[in-house]
Amino acid sequence: MKWTMWLRRWMRYVLEEGYAAEKNLLKERVSPGADWLDAACGEGELTASFHPGQYWGVDSASQAIHRARSTFPQYGFSTMDITRLPDRPRFDGILLSKVLHHLDDAQARAALEALVAALHPGGRILVIEPLPEPSLSAPLCYLFARLETGHHRRDTGSLADLLPAGTCLQHVGCLHKAAVRLGVWEIVRP
Ligand SMILES: C[S@@+](CC[C@H](N)C(=O)[O-])C[C@H]1O[C@@H](n2cnc3c(N)ncnc32)[C@H](O)[C@@H]1O
C-alpha cells in the first residue's frame, strides 16, 4: 500500500478521535439478537461494535473489504454496491455511516431505496453524516472538510428529500469532535 494511503488513514483516525463517539452511540443501539448491515463499511472502522454472527459488512471497494476481512476474520463481508443489494428484507438495523455525502442526489436516492427494501418492517437505518460546510471560525473542522473527498453534505431538510415514499426521518442528535461535527438520524421503515 502506498505511504500516502497510510498517512490518509492515520490522519482520519486521529482527526476522528478513534471513532469513539460512533462506538459509544452503537453501544446504546446494537442489541443482541438483531441482524445488522454495515452499508459501505469501509475497512471495518465500526465492525467491532457488532456481534459477529449478526453482522454483514458491504463496500464497493474490494481493497477495503480485503482489509476488513483480514482484520475481522470472524465477521461476514462482501464487495457490493449498496444500490444493488438483494431486495428481500433481512435486517433489523442498517448502519449508514459517512457514506451519503459521497453520493449525489440520484445515487443517494437509489442507495436509500435499496437499503429500506433490505429492512424488516419496523427496521431502522442509522445515518451518521458530517454536517454541512463548517466555516473558518472552526478551523480544524474547516480543514477536515477540505481534506474530505465527499462533496454532498446535507442538512435534515435535504436528507428528507431523498427518502423513499412511506418512510420517515428522525433527527437523533449530533456528535461533536474537534475536527468534525456529525449529524445522526434514523430512517424508519413502517
Ligand atoms: C468515508 S468511508 C466510510 C466508512 C465507514 N462506514 C465509516 O464510518 O468509517 C465511505 C465508504 O463508502 C464506500 N462507498 C461509496 N459508495 C458506495 C456504494 N455505492 N456502495 C458501497 N460502498 C460505497 C467507499 O468505498 C468508502 O469505503
Image (spheres, rainbow, N blue to C red):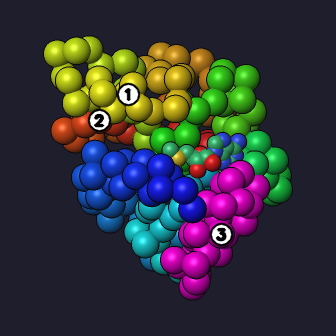
Q: Is residue 8 visible?
A: yes
Q: Report the residue marked by disc 3.
A: 66
- Read off the residue under disc 2: 180
Within the magenta stretch, is there residue 65?
yes
From the viewer's perspective, is residue 181 above or below residue 72?
above
Q: Is residue 186 left or right of residue 182?
A: right
Of the numbered discs in the image, which one, if any, rests on residue 190? none
Q: Compute the Cα span from label 3 to label 2.
A: 27 Å
Under mark 3, the amino acid is His
Report crowding for label 2: few under 14, some 14 to 19, many 20 or more residues within 10 A (C-alpha): many
Magenta residue check for 45: no
- Give the residue at mark 1: 145
Instruction: Tell us which disc is closer to us: 2 or 1.
Output: 1
Residue at figure coordinates x 63%, y 30% from the top left: 103
Question: Which is more N-terminal, label 1 or label 2?
Answer: 1
- The residue located at (57%, 69%) in the rendering is 68
Question: 54 or 1, which lies in front?
Answer: 1
The three-letter amino acid code for the residue at tag 2 is Val
Do the residues bearing badges 2 and 1 touch, measured as CB atoms within 8 Å?
yes
Is residue 126 in view from this perspective? no
From what the image shows, is residue 132 above or below residue 183?
above
Alpha carbon distance from label 1 to label 3: 27 Å
Per the rendered image, the range of residues in magenta is: 53-80
In terms of sequence position, does the residue under pointer 3 or pointer 2 come before the other? 3
Q: Is residue 12 above or below residue 164?
A: below
Disc 3: residue Cβ within 8 A of ligand 1's nearest atom: no
**What residue appears at the point 52 percent right and 30 percent down from the top-left corner?**
150
Whichever of callouts 1 and 3 sits on the residue coming sooner in the sequence is: 3
Q: Nearer the viewer, residue 12 or 104?
A: 12
Give the quadrant of residue 138. top left
